[in-house]
Image: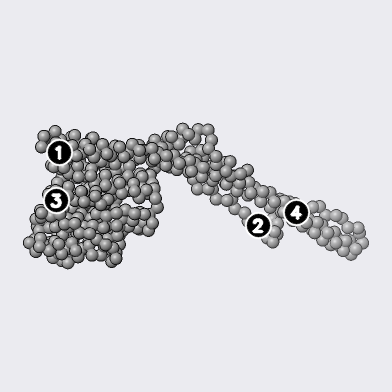
Amino acid sequence: MDGGDAAAPIDGDAEEIKSIVNIKMKRLRELADKAAKDLGLHYEALSVYTQSMSRSMLNGSAEYDDGNLQRAFQLYYRAAIIYLEVMPKHAGFNDPKNATVKAEASELCRQALSKNESLTVIVKEKFADDAKKEMASARQAVTDKTARDANVQQIDELDARLAALVHRRNERVGTVAAAAAAATAAMAVGRPPLMPSAPAAAGYQPPSAYSTAYTTAPTAAGVGGASSLYPSLDGLADFDVKPEEGLSADGLRWVHIPARLIPEFRARAKFNSESNRETCGILAGKLKNGVLSITALVMPPQTGEADSCSVVDDLPAFNYMEANGCMTIGWIHTHPSQTAFLSSVDLHTSCMYQTMLHEAIAIVCSVKYDDDQTFRLTTPGGMQAISRCEKRGFHPHEDKSLFEKCTHVKFDADATLEIVDLRL
């Protein structure tokens, strides 16, 4: 039988595929919904939520352009949920002074829903196509296993026939030998020989020269019953397009950092560092063929203290990134008089970045100790702990396993970098 016929669709596939697609779409929405609601209602300024929507939209567009439709869908959906379900619960949502912020968020929500309206059709088609291929593959595995079992049965039958032939040959050899011995003995005593009875077959083992060991062919992976004809629904593929450079040891896409980024940032932060004030910047860049490349250091209007740095206006940075098709890949800041680590405030900031991009990084430049480190929150531990924490400002997070040094970054001596200093 031709293998293609066995793998062809059968009655009932359409309903099964539809069920699989619906379950996967529901899972995508649940993940995005959680990412949106993890923002909570802890931020006093309503503009924080609009900014988060803006970043989700930019990152969603970057993922879409690189072919990662599932991630794009989640980011657009997250942006919409922030406006539809999170912001209305905020104390300042209906405050007249936030009318402009609300209008911006409403427009972003409209854009997100519009993008996902067409994207939903594409993602569903992809899920359906994947399900068809997995079901066909599973059926083919069953067909192949059946063919292997038939081959093993044929070999067993041939082996049994061979053993029987050897057995009969040995019987004949034994009979002739016994007859010759009997004849010799008879001649010795002067009486005719008697024909010996045939040897018993029970427990008979053919000579080793004729023995061949056959083992049952291994069961095809995933073949074990009717339910295994259908793909697993436990998880969703992280990437629709395989990253060009593969993934790092911890399963993340690589982030390329221009080698001149940190020296340039330190130089521009020097005045603040000498005055014991922190400086911060946004790491903007591009996503191409599964590789994240930082292309710009954007320094928004900000104020700095000895142990903190606050962005005064996020809009100029957003406008630059939108105009240049950039996504947010992480952030960088100085510690003028402390070591390189992530404080409680830093942890919450990084959590927001990683919610939008798993690979997002936080570079900390310790000026006093001349040490630069690249960190990220651990997953799932650090991300879960910080997203559930309702405290703001400086507060204790004694668990040192909440963040770790990045192993998915590469410094590129030849990479170009644009410095966009928007500080007042």
- Of discs 3 and 2, which sits in the foreground? 3
Q: Which residue is mark 4?
A: 165
Tell me if label 4 and label 1 are in contact, CB under 8 Å.
Answer: no
**Mark sitting earlier along the chain (4/2):** 4
- The amino acid at mark 4 is Leu
Between the residue at mark 4 and the residue at mark 2, the CA separation in whole angstroms equals 14 Å
Residue reaching furthest front?
323
Tell me if label 1 and label 2 are in contact, CB under 8 Å.
Answer: no
Looking at the rendered image, the quarter that the C terminus falls into is bottom left
Tag on residue 212?
A: 2
Between the residue at mark 4 and the residue at mark 1, the CA separation in whole angstroms equals 95 Å
- Of discs 3 and 1, which sits in the foreground? 1
**Mark sitting earlier along the chain (3/2):** 2
Between the residue at mark 1 and the residue at mark 2, the CA separation in whole angstroms equals 84 Å
Looking at the rendered image, the quarter that the N terminus falls into is top right
Between the residue at mark 3 and the residue at mark 2, the CA separation in whole angstroms equals 78 Å
- Residue 15 appears at what percent x and percent y? 46, 32
Q: Quadrant of residue 204?
A: bottom right
Tag on residue 311?
A: 3
Say which element carries label 2. Answer: loop
Please tell me which residue lies in front, 73 or 61: 61
Judge left or right: residue 2 versus residue 283. Answer: right
**Is 203 rendered above or below residue 98?**
below
**Mark sitting earlier along the chain (1/2):** 1
Instruction: Check disc 3: other Cα within 10 Å, few if <14, some if 14-19, many if 20+.
Output: some
Judge left or right: residue 413 versus residue 370. Answer: right
- The amino acid at mark 3 is Val
**Mark sitting earlier along the chain (3/1):** 1
